[in-house]
Each structure stands twice: as C-alpha cells, then as structure tokens.
Amino acid sequence: MLMLAVFHLFFLLVTQASPLDQVLKYIDDHQDDYVKHLKEWVSIQSESGDPLKRDKVIEMVHIAGKAIESLGGSVELTDLGTEELPDGKMIPLPPVVLGELGTDPNKTTVCIYGHIDVQPARIEDGWATDPYVLTERNGKLYGRGASDDKGPVLAWLHAIEAVQALKQELPVNLKFIFEAMEESGSKGLEKILSEKNATYFSNVDYIVISDSGWLSSNPALTYGTRGLCYFLVEVQCAKQDLHSGLYGGVVHEAMTDLIALLDSLVNSTGHILIPDIDEDVVPLTNEEHLLYKTIEFNPEGFKDNIGATRLRHETKEDLLLHRWRFPSLSIHGIEGAFSGPGAKTVIPAKVIGKFSIRLVPDMDPNKVNRQVATYLSQVFAERRSPNKLRITLNNGSKAWVADVTDKQYVAGRRAISRVFGVEAELIRGGGTIPIVRMFQQTMQKSVMMLPIGGAGDAIHSQDESISRDNYINGTKLLAAYLAEISQL
Ligand SMILES: *[C@@H]1O[C@H](CO)[C@@H](O)[C@H](O)[C@H]1NC(C)=O
Ligand SMILES: *[C@@H]1O[C@H](CO)[C@@H](O)[C@H](O)[C@H]1NC(C)=O
Ligand SMILES: *[C@@H]1O[C@H](CO)[C@@H](O)[C@H](O)[C@H]1NC(C)=O
Ligand SMILES: *[C@@H]1O[C@H](CO)[C@@H](O)[C@H](O)[C@H]1NC(C)=O
Ligand SMILES: *[C@@H]1O[C@H](CO)[C@@H](O)[C@H](O)[C@H]1NC(C)=O
C-alpha cells in the first residue's frame, strides 16, 4: 500500500514537469525541425549591401512576416521608401517587419528586435562549403546568417511556437521589429522608431536583442557597447601629384604634414594625446571592477589568436577594460597615398588620413568632434605649413550602457542559470551597435542584449556558423527569459 502511494507520488512528480520544463523538452525534441528552418532561411541570399540582391532581401522580409503570422501574430510591413545608389539609381528599401502577438493589458510587453539581412558571402572568398547551404560539421551549422542574425531570430520564433504547441498561455505580449538593412546602416529604422514611439511602441516595457555572441564558452548578457566618432583629415599641397626628382626639397609635402598630424594623436602606450579627451569618462567604481574578475577570458590565447607579440596590457582585467570601458583611437588608412608594390617617386598632391575614436560613457560625440578639430588645427598651425587642411567630422554615435540591476537583467540572469546551470557572464562590447542606443534613446525603455551566438562564430567572415548546441540551448534560453520576465 505504502509502496503504491510512493509510486503514485513519484508518478505525479514525473508527469507534472513545470510548464517551462515541458517547453525546454519540447525544444530538444524538435531541434531537427529548427535546423531545417534555419537551412531554409540561410538559403535566401538577403545581402542588404548588394543592390542586385534587393529582391532576395525583400523576399526574406515576407518570409519573416509570414512566420510571425503563422504564430497567430498580426504583421505590418512598413514601407521605408527608396534608396539612392551612388550612380543615382533608386531601388526600394526593404520594409521593416512589425509584428504583434498578444495584447493582454495585464501582461508585460516585450519587444524583440532582430535582423534578417546578411553580410555578403561567396564560396570563392574561402568558405569550406557553399555559404548559402547550411551545412553541419562537427556540431556546427555553417552558413551566412546562421549566427548573425537569422539563427537568433528563428530561435525567438521557435521558443514561442514551443509554448503554443504545448497549449500553454504565452507569458508576455510580444512586439517584433525585424529589419533587413542592419548590415547597411539600418537605413530608415530610426525614423520608424520615432514615428511609432507614441503609438505602436507605447506599451513596450522591455526591448531585447539577440544579435551578438558570448565572450567564451560561458553564456553572457551584454550591457554595454562603445560609441564611435570617425574622422577624415585632408591635406593638399598641390593641384596634381608631383615628381620627387623635380619638386622634392622645395614643396611642403602633404604627406609629411599628414603623418605628423596622425602621429600627434596617440602615443606608443596608447594614450590619446588630445587634451581633456577623457574628462567625461565615467570613473570606474570598485563594484564595476569586480564584474571583470569573474569573466572568463584568456589573455594569452587572445594574443596568440591574432599573432601579436605583445599587447599593451597584460592582465585579463586591463585588457577587457581597454576593449570595453575606455576610449581608444585607431588610425585606419590614408587615401591618395602611394600604396602599390614597387618604388614610385611620387609626391601625392592630396592625402586623406582616416582615424576614429571609440567612445565610452559619458563622452559626447559633438564635444569629441570639437576637441579633435581644435587640437589638429593647433598641431597643424605649429608646423607653419602653407598647405590646405580640411577636417571632416561625421555624425558620431554615443556609447550605450545599461543598468545591470534592472529587472530585465535579473530575468536574463535567471534564465541563464535555469537553462545552463551557471551564472551569466556580464560583458560589454568594444564595437558599436548604433541600434541599441537608438532603441534606448527613442523609447526610453530598458534594452538588453541576450546573445545566443558562440565566441567563435566568425560572423561577417568566412565559415560563419552557430553550433547546434548554442542554437538549441539558445532557443531554450529565450523561452526561459520570456517566462522569467513575466514574473518580475
Ligand atoms: C486583468 O487583471 C484584472 C485584475 O486581476 C482582471 O479583473 C481583468 O479581468 C484582467 N484583464 C484581462 C484582460 O485578463
Ligand atoms: C517615447 O515614448 C515613451 C513612452 O512610451 C516616452 O517615455 C519617450 O520620451 C518617448 N520618446 C520620445 C523621443 O518622444
Ligand atoms: C603617453 O602619454 C601618457 C599620458 O600623457 C604618459 O603618461 C605616458 O608616459 C606616455 N607614454 C609614452 C611612451 O610617452
Ligand atoms: C548630424 O546629422 C544631422 C542630419 O544629417 C545634421 O543636421 C547635423 O548637423 C550632423 N551633426 C554633426 C555633428 O555632423
Ligand atoms: C546544450 O545542448 C547540448 C546538446 O543539445 C547538451 O548536451 C548540453 O548539455 C546543453 N548544455 C547545457 C548547459 O544545457
């Protein structure tokens, strides 16, 4: 009798797995379907940077819209008008997919952003297999967009589908915004965000973005990215290129001026020499510094990976701080300089130096622009050069940083420990993802980056991939996040 009761209790425990556990199991059981869907999406060559492939990009937009509709959502394809190509030709911009699923005023509303366009890829670039045929090798799914960002977009849709297939109630209301110009500067996106801020987006509580990767094999939440100011410095000494045999020794050479200007920007220890450039950098607190201690990052491996002999910093903390938390200045190139093989004795008439500064909170791009212009003009004046100097300031983007104690981050951390059984790594990015800040600035809501891609996914590169584990466990993570955020 007792035996029977115990057995009965055991039976109850087994059959009454929590709703989320059922979802996670469902996701495991359907992983081959999810890989098949990714294969279908990867086969569409939605390269937003190639005007000849614009119809593919638009086809991808329709496929994504249909996928939301098949979950029962309503979809609006928002027209963005046309794009003017450098030759003056006009082509249509792909519409933005706006989707809505659930309007229960008692539920939290989560807005999911993703992009369905991709970077260019051709097998001749050195891919092991056709970039547009998803191919599984050694547990990895290779294909353009597998990790950036078709895999993560599908992972969201699959997470929702799993909840519905089990006849569970969706824990949140969802708004989707999927764009197809992300790899080409997100043309038109900001306009849509501001136009629809007071209407379509007004009830959004949280914005979550899964479009980046982990730093190591540990699951991570990304809470900051750096901003960017990009500069062009032009020096002109003559109206045409000159022969150094005829003019060497008599003209003030543009290239010499430019090299001196570029050399005045940063010293050999990496300090930016522009006065007061870092006066607005938020001081590092002890608490924040502690976050860096627990992050898994191997300085030696990082160095060896790029084939560098020595880096500017040695410890894990210093390296990560300088990648994410402090500004940096990089010199990118010189247009107009002789750069071919051989020994040409030219004095270039006009050269344009290109450099940029990665910004961190609370640096302001407009102020950085002014500081750079003032400083370079002064360095140039001291050279007493008669040449023409022109500094072009581009619209910079500010850095983004989120409050990691915000509810959304609590939900993200809980979801990670639920699915992976480990603590989330809190990381930042050294690069610039303008849309993240755009969302935060326009909507004034909490934004979180919840990546599912791995550290070695080679996005934008040859042999981009996402591991099957990341793709499937990532789908579980997104399902767990929706369950967790609904309870906060
Ligand atoms: C929202 O919650 C209130 C209070 O619990 C309840 O009266 C109302 O019916 C709920 N609305 C919906 C749409 O479920
Ligand atoms: C967008 O709407 C939110 C309220 O949903 C508001 O707080 C915010 O200020 C608005 N943004 C702009 C730029 O008006
Ligand atoms: C670079 O500049 C910083 C700040 O002015 C200074 O502390 C450092 O010694 C300089 N390094 C070199 C190699 O000159
Ligand atoms: C940034 O772009 C806007 C619109 O194109 C322009 O009005 C503004 O002057 C620009 N700002 C800077 C600092 O270049
Ligand atoms: C991730 O997925 C793989 C295969 O699906 C599984 O073996 C592994 O345990 C998962 N990892 C975690 C931490 O859940």
Image (cartoon, grey):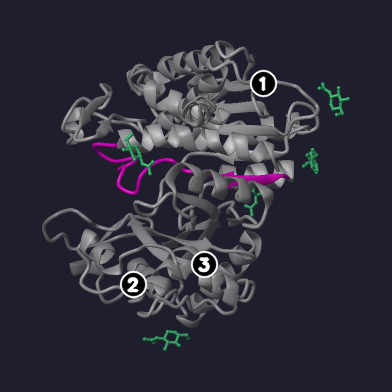
Measured in 3D between alpha carbons, the distance from the residue under mark 3 to the one under mark 1, in whole angstroms, is 36 Å
Q: Is residue 361 magenta?
A: no
Establish if 60 lies above or below 271. Answer: above
Measured in 3D between alpha carbons, the distance from the residue under mark 2 to the one under mark 3, in whole angstroms, is 45 Å
Which residue has dot 1 on it? 100
Query: What type is the residue that disc 1 sits on?
Result: Glu
Q: Position of residue 173 (x, y in %)?
A: 69, 27
Which residue has dot 3 on it? 291
Q: Give the SS element for disc 1.
A: strand
Q: Give the SS element for disc 2.
A: helix
* Residue in the picture at 42% in, 72% down: 317
Residue in the foreground of this view, choosing between 153 and 459:
153
Task: Give the magenta part as a residue range.
Answer: 445-464
Which tag, 3 or 1, sits closer to the chain's start?
A: 1
Which tag, 2 or 3, sits closer to the chain's start?
A: 2
Crowd tier of the residue under label 3, counting other residues whose Cα lies within 10 Å: few below 14, some 14–19, many 20 or above: few
Query: What type is the residue that disc 2 sits on?
Result: Thr
Residue in the foreground of this view, choosing between 13 and 357:
13
Ligand 3 rendered quadrant:
bottom left
Q: Is residue 463 magenta?
A: yes
Is residue 117 among what the camera can see? no
Residue in the foreground of this view, choosing between 328 and 164:
164
Q: Is mark 1 within 8 Å of ligand 2?
A: no
Measured in 3D between alpha carbons, the distance from the residue under mark 2 to the one under mark 1, in whole angstroms, is 58 Å
Q: Which SS type dominates the magenta stretch? A: loop
Labels 3, 1: front one:
3
Labels 2, 3: front one:
3
Q: In the image, is 277 to the left or to the right of 343?
A: right
